[in-house]
Image (spheres, rainbow, N blue to C red):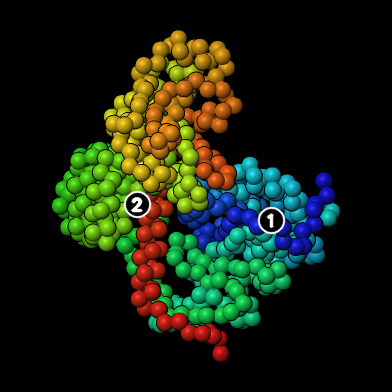
Amino acid sequence: MRPTIVENKAQEPSNLAVLKFGGSVLQDAQAVHSAAHEIYRFVRRGEKVLAVVSAIAGETDALVAMGQYIGGDNNAPGSASLVRLGELRAAALLALALERVGLDARAVDPAEIDLRAKGDPDDAGLCGLDHDRLSTLLAEHEVLVVPGFSGVLDNGQPALLGRGGTDLSAVYLGVALNAKRVRLIKDVDGLYVSDPKLDPNPRRFTQINWDDAAEICGNSIQDHALDYAQKHDLRLEIAAPARGFDTCITPQSVSAHCSAQTNKLKVALLGFGTVGEGVYAHLQRHKDLFEVSGILVRDAGKKRNSDAPAHLISTDAGEVFAKRPDIVVEMIGGVDSADAFILNAFFGGADVVSANKAVMAENFDTLNEAAGRAGRALHYSAAVGGGVPMLEALDQARNGGGVRSVQGVINGTANFILDRLAEGCPFDQAVKEAQDKGFAEADPSADLDGDDAAAKLCLMARHGFDAPLRANQIAMQSLSDLDQEHIDAARNAGKVIRQISEIKRDDKGALKASVSLQTIDKDHYLAGAKGEQNRLIVHALEGENIHLRGKGAGRWPTAEAVMADLLDIHRLRGQYEEKLNVRVSEPACA
Ligand code: NAP
Ligand code: HSE
């Protein structure tokens, strides 16, 4: 099919974030997990993401050298076929990292969307794409990952876009799709008047105009990309991963004095099980932002997968709190001890991130009031939906006109077990498998009987309906009540059994909630949740219903949501501290 040549913006404004990750941030293969945090941050804000990636640092040079070694100099376009493999590999790795946390991500080869290049095979420009194909892929997936730096010539051969060409890929796609934002993510959090590594009192541009940007950027943004963005009046953001600051390229330049260094925050981990070990692994890759000051467990002698040093691990909460953490991450589960630890954290001046729906549902008001009194933050995104940002979607729906009802599969363990039972697995074995995979609660009866889903509904009621709901007001059915006859009948009828959690308002406006076992058609949206996956339908009072899906349980999806809360706190603290110092000057450039 011939491409729809796109030289102008798509007419429809979109809710799309184009995020470009350069080699300076993809320092090694593990760095794709940090890129995944950045993508998750925008997904949970309700934005669709198209990530454009460079090769992992050093790979392009290695491929160029290999091409010259085999083919000699002047070997384009043959060399383009080889060199573009660096970007393809980075895209595949990033898609895998996103899949691990449960995002519906798809790597897309530029040839698949006929991203058309023209000019020199090693320094080409872009001139068209198969817009329909790209739009279809965007509609089908939450995140697309496109390898930057190459396109396809009219003769079908690949061409490279010159040094820094991934910037051009991102800008070009951003213009073609009328993206809400195009964010070039690099190793420095914006454009500076002077080198922030050398200047003790650096000034970062909060905004910069095109001419000043072209002068200041040097090699940090590709010239062709800047020209193309200016020609199409595209607002560009220059940012670093995990940082709360950026520079926007806009018509006017404004710079501000700033502290280039954001303080490192001390983090105490309460609990070092399925979720805790995952969060620890992420924090190890962000030692510039966080330092783990202590880890609380029940049994210090337990064999663990993590290589955390023994001196950090303690069974003494007093010892862990004595390190004066800035943030306490509660991942022990249960109500009473967790409640006491969270209150203690506020008392000691720490912000709190919790993955624990039981304590949050039971003591929602007292914990939030305590946070407010102490002037501290309380985040608990991971408590509902694992890696599926359900509470955030409910906030957005409530603020955007209100929620009529919600209906979902919100317990991964129950869903996993129901699928295994339908496959003929014995009940006890299915429960054991869910425990071994790290999906189940410490006491799996909470998953089986509906208490875990009920606790989640209590939190969803707060976010979606701004109303209290107690677990004892929720009617529940237990998986233990299912008999083989019931399971066989559903299978023979080509249907599936799902544990479905619902909240709606009755005629008098009161909330009605339930956790029930329902036999539904295979093509029902909620039937599509497989294994530990969760799905949610938010019926909006106004506008379109929201459909969410992803991994609702397990180490990596849950650790992703915890990490997103930690990074939000870090960003907010940095922004607050900088506001205290900031002196804005205008215009920035002499
Ligand atoms: P887990 O694997 O059982 O780990 C719990 C950790 O907490 C263990 O390290 C345990 O110490 C420690 N612990 C428990 N009680 C303690 C106490 N009183 N004092 C000190 N340490 C204590 O649990 P998990 O799966 O990581 O879940 C943690 C929390 O995240 C729960 O609230 C759960 O509901 C929530 N969550 C879990 C998932 C998931 O998929 N697993 C998803 C979303 C939310 P030892 O290691 O010494 O036993
Ligand atoms: N046990 C819970 C579940 C963990 O299976 O859904 C995620 O909240």
Nearer-the-camera pick, 507 or 337:
507
Q: Nearer the viewer, mark 2 or mark 1?
A: 1
Residue type, numbered disc 1 = Glu
**Residue at the bottom extreme, as displayed:** 590
Relative to 418, 24 lies left or right: right
Counting residues from the start of the chain, the first of labels 2 and 1 encountered is 1
User: Residue visible at 52% across and 46% down?
Assistant: 98
Q: How many marks?
A: 2
User: Residue visible at 56% across and 71% down?
Assistant: 248
Q: Which residue is mark 1?
A: 12
Q: Relative to 264, does residue 400 appear above or below in the rendering?
A: above
SS label for mark 1 = loop
Instruction: Work out whether residue 323 can be spotted.
Output: no
Where in the figure is residue 140, as x and y percent of width and height? 63, 42
User: Residue visible at 31% across and 57% down?
Assistant: 377
Instruction: Work out whether residue 402 can be spotted.
Output: yes
Which label was assigned to residue 521? none
- Quarter of the image for residue 453 reads top left
Q: Which residue is mark 2?
A: 379
Nearer-the-camera pick, 513 or 434:
513
Where in the figure is residue 590, as x and y percent of width and height? 56, 90
